[in-house]
Amino acid sequence: MRAEKPVGNRLTSARVLGDMKNVTEVQRRPSPGGRPQPLAVYEDRLWVGAWETDHIYAIDTKAWSFEKSVPAPGKPYGIARFGSGLMTVVSLGEDDDRYFYRYDSAGGFDPSSKVACPDFTGSHLAADGSTLYLCQQGKRQILTLDANLAIARTIALPTRCGGFAFGPGGDCYMITADAEFENLEFARFDLRAAEPKPEPIAAVPFDARGLTFDGTAWWTCHREENQIVAFTV
């Protein structure tokens, strides 16, 4: 697929909130589809789901070329690398019911893998080895799921979640927000704790959704601006 011209690299100026500064943007690029949200790193590519097209895209982040465009079974709300492929959460039908689907580059989306999310709700996904984590925003909780997608644990969510992912050292990190989905922060969120609480690291000065880590930088989406952003802290 064709390469897109970059919007340009930029750095975010520091905005001090108490002792907290902003995350530092290192790239801000155009999305291959309108209103991007979920992201994951898979097979050395950044995979992004877009709401306007209901597709997922594989992006070479160095050349910013869109190497694959795949129609999803529905509107993509969550993506995480899980096992040998990607696990996705998509919305189906007028009732906005949420389902899991597996995807791999060889076979695409597997229709036989369709499984309803608990209570037909869920959005952001993160994975750590054989464990999958599903954010249920309306219920203010994160579910720990085993390899068979059975619930192993329910974790109360003390803030709104704009996305979460595992990063350096195997720790979990999250984009948190207040009840109005404002005052976004990048925070460590220790899912191993009995009652995890976000530990703020840096402010996020734009309306970020989705989160993944490529080994060097974090990636998120500025959804309503149709942009994909890489940042460090």
Image (cartoon, rainbow, N blue to C red):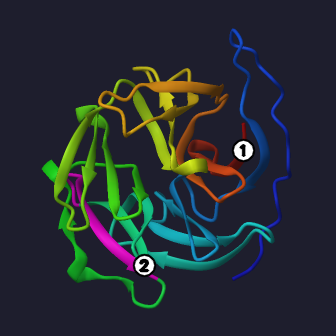
**With respect to residue 208, does 61 lie above or below?**
below
Mark number displayed over residue 41: none
Q: In this view, does 128 lie to the left or right of 68?
A: left
**With respect to residue 217, does 13 lie above or below?**
above
Q: Mark 1 points at which residue?
A: 231
User: Residue at 28% of width from left, 31% of height from top?
Assistant: 140
Quadrant in which the C terminus is drawn: top right
Seen as rendered, the residue at the extreme left is: 119
Q: Do the residues labelled 2 and 1 touch (CB within 8 Å)?
A: no
Q: In this view, does 15 lie to the left or right of 164?
A: right
Nearer mark to the viewer, of 2 and 1:
2
Q: Name the residue under label 2.
A: 84
Whether residue 120 is visible: no
Q: Where is residue 151 in the image (x, y as percent from the top left)?
A: 17, 52
Crowd class of label 2 (few under 14; some 14 to 19; many from 20; radius 10 Å): few
Q: Position of residue 213 (x, y in %)?
A: 61, 54
Q: Where is residue 108 in the image (x, y as percent from the top left)?
A: 41, 84
User: Residue at 37% of width from left, 29% of height from top?
Assistant: 196
**With respect to residue 192, does 145 lie above or below?**
below
Disc 1 residue type (three-letter):
Phe
Q: Is residue 161 left or right of residue 32?
A: left
Label 2 sits on a secondary structure element that is: loop
- SS majority, magenta: strand
In the image, the segment drawn in magenta is 93-104
Q: In this view, does 217 lie to the left or right of 210?
A: right
Disc 2 residue type (three-letter):
Ser
Q: Where is residue 184 in the image (x, y as percent from the top left)?
A: 56, 27
* Picture mark count: 2
User: Residue at 82% of width from left, 60% of height from top?
Assistant: 6
User: Residue at 41% of width from left, 63% of height from top?
Assistant: 129
Seen as rendered, the residue at the extreme top is: 18
Q: Confirm whether the magenta stretch covers residue 95.
A: yes
